[in-house]
Amino acid sequence: MTDKRLLLVHAHPDDESIGQGVTMAKYVAEGAGVTLVTCTAGEMGEILVPELVHLAADQQDGLGEHRRGELEDAMKILGVTDHRFLGGFGTYRDSGMKWHEDGHAVAADDVHENAFWHADLTEAADHLVSVIREVRPQVLVTYDQFGGYGHPDHIQAHRVAMYAAQLAAVPSYRHDLGEPWDIAKIYWGAMSAGRMRAGLKALRDAGDTTTFEGMDPEGPLPPFVTPDELLSAVIDGPEYAEQKADAMKAHATQITVDGPFFALSNNVGNTIWGSEFFRLAKGTAGKVGADGLETDLFAGLSDFGDLAD
């Protein structure tokens, strides 16, 4: 095993590249072990490629298999060689979602019987317990309790990851799933309100009024944005932003990376996509930078995995 081991738990293919593409590429480049667990294949996602609309759930229902290929391509770009589906591919299906009148996601009216949202929590957590005890990560990254913006699969991924982390550490729990392992630090991915406002201002100053339409740099922000005072860590890696963008492009059915928002982010030195923020949910913060944030998710670890600060 490598000295540093990072585990990420995400709901669908593409979530990982959007949320922590830079973080993953950076730690891979530094020789750390990076493991990604994806909970569903994203079968219910919208399709942005016209010639692939026949893969939609209400047609051939082949989007999940296609997105598995997109995920493989994205991981090759980021250098991640250990990526798995929770319980194996097809164990849990994308639950889908709809938009609430308040602007956040909620569960769809009709949810497939095998949807991740309906998964038994202990059963799903046990699948992850076996991964945790095999990989023995010092750091886990997942969503906050709201899943960022309310998507039921993001919320469920949070619940499964947090519960599995607890169960994996219990010495008397399920010996058949491996030797107990206590994850030293758990982070929830976050988006900085300050960075978001700066990005919005740059867009508006450049004459772009359609990207994030209706959102004022000085006004209220959506629920997936975190006040800066609640942030714990930042991974600044502008040198990996291009890799992140390429990984996002690999998820072509879900993401368009040629719009003004992405172009602008490159023009201003990748300040938006080259920095990824986190909230510390378990563990003790290590050394922080001038802005009061950790700049290494492994900072401060010495008693787990023989790491030194």
Image (cartoon, helix red, strand yellow):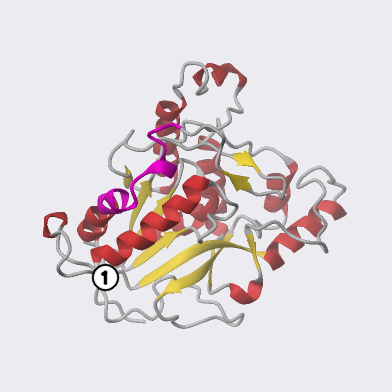
Identify the image quadrant of residue 146: bottom right
Determine the residue positioned at 21% across, 69% down: 170
Looking at the picture, tell me which residue is in the foreground, 85 or 308.
85
**Residue 11 can be seen in this image:** yes
Membership of 115 in magenta stretch = yes
Residues in magenta? 112-127
- Secondary structure under tag 1 reads loop
Q: Is residue 296 left or right of residue 149?
A: left
Q: Quadrant of the N terminus?
A: bottom left
Q: Position of residue 232 (x, y in %)?
A: 53, 74
Compared with 36, 233 (above or below) is: below
Looking at the picture, tell me which residue is in the foreground, 248 or 53.
53
Q: Is residue 110 left or right of residue 268?
A: left
Q: Which residue lies most toward the front here?
A: 109
Determine the residue positioned at 28% across, 42% down: 87
Looking at the picture, tell me which residue is in the foreground, 237 or 205.
205
Compared with 160, 256 (above or below) is: above
Q: What secondary structure is the stretch in magenta mostly built from? A: helix
Q: Quadrant of the C terminus?
A: bottom left
Q: What residue type is disc 1 on?
A: Asp
Q: Position of residue 251 (x, y in %)?
A: 52, 36
Q: What residue would you read off at disc 1?
A: 182
Q: Is residue 171 left or right of residue 131?
A: left
Membership of 246 in magenta stretch = no
Identify the image quadrant of residue 89: top left
Q: Position of residue 85 (x, y in %)?
A: 33, 42
Q: Position of residue 157 (x, y in %)?
A: 42, 52
Q: Is residue 84 left or right of residue 213?
A: left
Mark 1 crowd level (few <14, some 14–19, many ≥20, 10 Å Cα): some
Determine the residue positioned at 59% across, 24% down: 49
